[in-house]
Image (spheres, rainbow, N blue to C red):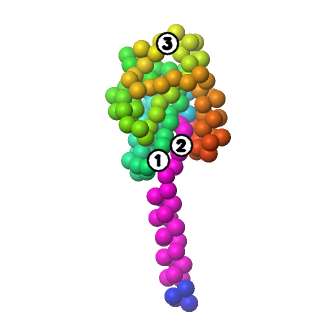
Amino acid sequence: MKTFFLFLGLLLCANVAWAQQKPVRIVFDVTSADPSVHQAAIRHVSLMAQSYPGSSYEVVVYGQAIEMVLDSKSSVAKEIATLASGNQVKFAVCELTMKKFNVDKPQLIGGVMSVPDGILEIYSRQQEGWGYIKEGH
């Protein structure tokens, strides 16, 4: 009986180790104007990217969160530029939000892309099997 439990324990450990190595794809939804939410989103995506280097992440920004991706107003501009310079983390801002707040592409932090509709971008990622995280307090 002792051997059975030892075997079961080793099997469970092997499954956990394998699960931690499996790449993930996660889309982060950011709509808050609160800079502490922006900082939390960057912290979360950075830690995930470090922990799962073969994985893909996309941070979709729309609504009141527009300042998160504006070069002149973002509290996380340097972090976004660094993360966006690689190929693991993408930042996407909603063009409808840009239009609403009179923002042009040159105002965006380098590496931030635009998408026609932020909500549709999130929906599309979910249809592709991506996990979903809503950032907020």
Residue 115 visible in the shown view: yes
Which residue is rendered at x = 60% and y = 34% of the image? 122
Across and down, in percent, residue 49 comes to: 42, 45
Region rendered in magenta: 5-28
Viewer-proximal residue among 54 and 100:
54
Across and down, in percent, residue 45 comes to: 45, 40
Which residue is rendered at x = 53% and y = 45% of the image? 25
Give the residue type that dot 2 points to. Ile
Across and down, in percent, residue 87 comes to: 41, 38
**Secondary structure under the numbered disc 1 in the rendered image:** loop
Q: CA distance from mark 1 to mark 2?
A: 8 Å
Give the residue type that dot 1 points to. Ser
Furthest residue toward top? 102
Q: Are marks 1 and 2 in contact (CB under 8 Å)?
A: yes
Residue to which mark 3 is pinned: 103
The answer to which of marks 1 and 2 sits earlier in the sequence is: 2
Would residue 8 appear left or right of 72 to someone viewing this image? right
Residue to which mark 2 is pinned: 26
Q: Nearer the viewer, mark 1 or mark 2?
A: 1
Q: Please identify the quarter of the rendering in which residue 83 is found.
A: top left
Q: CA distance from mark 3 to mark 1?
A: 31 Å
Which residue is rendered at x = 53% and y = 43% of the image? 26
Give the residue type that dot 3 points to. Val
